[in-house]
Image (cartoon, rainbow, N blue to C red):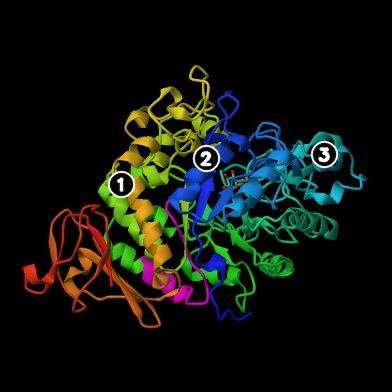
Amino acid sequence: MSIDKYKWWQKTIVYQIYPRSFKDSTGNGIGDLRGIIEKLDYLKELGVESIWFSPFFTSPQQDHGYDVANFREIDPLYGTMEDFDKILKEIHDKKMKIVLDLVLNHTSIKHPWFIESASSKDNSKRDWYVWRDGKKPGGKKPPNNWKAIPGGPAWIYYENTDQWFYFHFLPFQPDLNYRNPEVKEEMLNTMRFWLDKGVDGFRLDILHSIFEDKLLRNNPFSWALTLSDKKPACYFQYHKYDLNLPETLDFTIELRNLMEEYEPDRFLVGEIFVSIENVRKYYGPNNNGLHMVFLFEFTSTPFKSKKYRKVISRIEKALPFPFTPTFVYSNHDRVRHISLLKDNVKKAKILATMQLTLRGVPFIYYGEEIGMGNVKFKLKTSEDPIGRKFSKFPFPQIVRLLGFSLTRDSCRTPMQWNADSNAGFTPNPEVKTWLKISDNYKKVNVSRGEKNPNSLLNCYKRLIEVRRENISLQEGLFHIIDLGKLNKKCLAYKRIHEKQEIFVYLNFINKDILLENPIQKPDLIFSTLSNRKALDPNAYDGNIKLTPFEGVIFK
Ligand code: GLC
């Protein structure tokens, strides 16, 4: 499928909302759809176009919505189908797009399909999940050595039928069996159900684990302890037979074909743990698979110009135009990146400038634009089941030392709207919010950010505007600029569209730097410093001066 003209989704900006934490309208301390409706003007003003909602479908909430019990209903905790229809209409009226989060891989253990499936071996839904006999003799050991991603065996024994079921993630999330055509059909119809309503795209949860080896062969050994984005291996196991199967790749083409039935264009973005070099296969042999895949490399790239330069070059090599890369710093599973930057707002502005000027689609996690950071939580009482699991882990410090947050509660705290009690997240100032609000909410909040011209929030707004006003930043080709010895300090590149060339220079160090000026009369269109009005090469022997951690865009 050749793309000769840029499609809207190739240059969109996506904003991720975690519905529990964005805005509570009822006063129960949990965010909901009506709350989100109240804040759509904020998002419009910020300038983002596509809004991705983490799941709000019916769910026992054991994994806060990633354990679905009905894929075509709204969980009453978040509202009703009427609320959804309203949100969809309002988003479209504002010329924005709506992206749903679809968990194709598994259901909740409380999904009626699973309850039926588990009831007996001859139930019509038995084969909707992956049931197997245990290892012989006796069958009291799991069918193979597969481990779940958060650790421990990936199988649970059910005495009533003397068989085991397979789960890739958590024990209450049994994997659906995509080798059964009924399952596939049902899930494709679920997608149609939402597409017919008018949704503009789907984020596909852990798509790499849709299919597993038919023969259920044992996974080989690996030295990897914790999961990384470089290799699908962890807890000393290489996930050869349960991840990234050829059948899963074929499935992406089926998914794409379904999306192509709809006008105007819709898109798919897949959550997949693969290296940059291996990601291309998910885009399909002729760019006819997923429209986009999350590239998570930025979530762990140290704040060094040379490191980013290298990652960006690898991305450009692996996914040249018309493939569309994505740029992610944080999400509801990962450490908020400003915490990795030790709350350094200047550094966060550099990364924001980069994210919004590279060739591809930026994904902004709610609160990232105001500098919300990770918050500490006790593991034992963690809302996140992963946190509770780690509280039993013998050496949690080791995992922490490796830079992982042990409970995802830390990055999911309520949005900080203002300095009122409960940060304006809920109309009820007395209520205990589902996760505590960060202590820094009086300093870090939307209302404060809006009033300060030099805030991170206003930096995002200006960047988004500059991107919108300059076609090169949306559709331009990308060229890295070699600064020789200065590559260690500064990252520079240009975006070119027909005759328009736009330059981006990012100073990664805490000192002034002077750089050779690439054009005659640079016209400054953006600086991370809100009061900087021009680049003045005449004052510096024809060079450009960047102040510590300053990023500029000029043409
Ligand atoms: C994905 C989601 C995560 C969820 C898991 C299981 O990684 O992002 O939040 O717990 O899949 O669905």
Judged from the image, the secondary structure of the residue bearing numbered disc 3 is helix
Residue at 36% x, 46% y is 457
Considering depth in this image, is 241 or 136 the residue closer to the camera?
241
Extreme front residue here?
A: 93
- The reply, left or right, for residue 94 in relation to residue 424 is right
What SS does tag 2 mark? loop
Q: Which mark is residue 385?
A: none
Residue carrying label 2: 39
Residue 281 lies in the magenta stretch: no
Determine the CA span between mark 3 and mark 2.
34 Å
Q: Amino acid at mark 1?
A: Leu
> Can residue 225 be seen here?
no
Q: Which residue is mark 1?
A: 341
- Residue 330 is one of the magenta-drawn residues: yes
Confirm or reject: label 1 Cβ below 8 Å from ligand 1.
no
Q: Amino acid at mark 2?
A: Lys
Residue type indicated by callout 3:
Pro
Q: Quadrant of the N terminus?
A: bottom right
The residues bearing labels 1 and 3 have C-alpha atoms spaced at a distance of 45 Å
- The extreme top residue here reads 430
The spot of residue 528 in percent (x, y) is 26, 55
Q: Of residues 504 and 39, which is closer to you in this image?
A: 39
Residue 214: image location, x then y, percent:
75, 61
Q: Quadrant of residue 303?
A: bottom left
Q: Which residue is mark 3?
A: 112
Q: Nearer the viewer, residue 461 or 257?
A: 461
Few, some or many residues within 10 Å of mark 2 (<14, 14–19, 20+): some
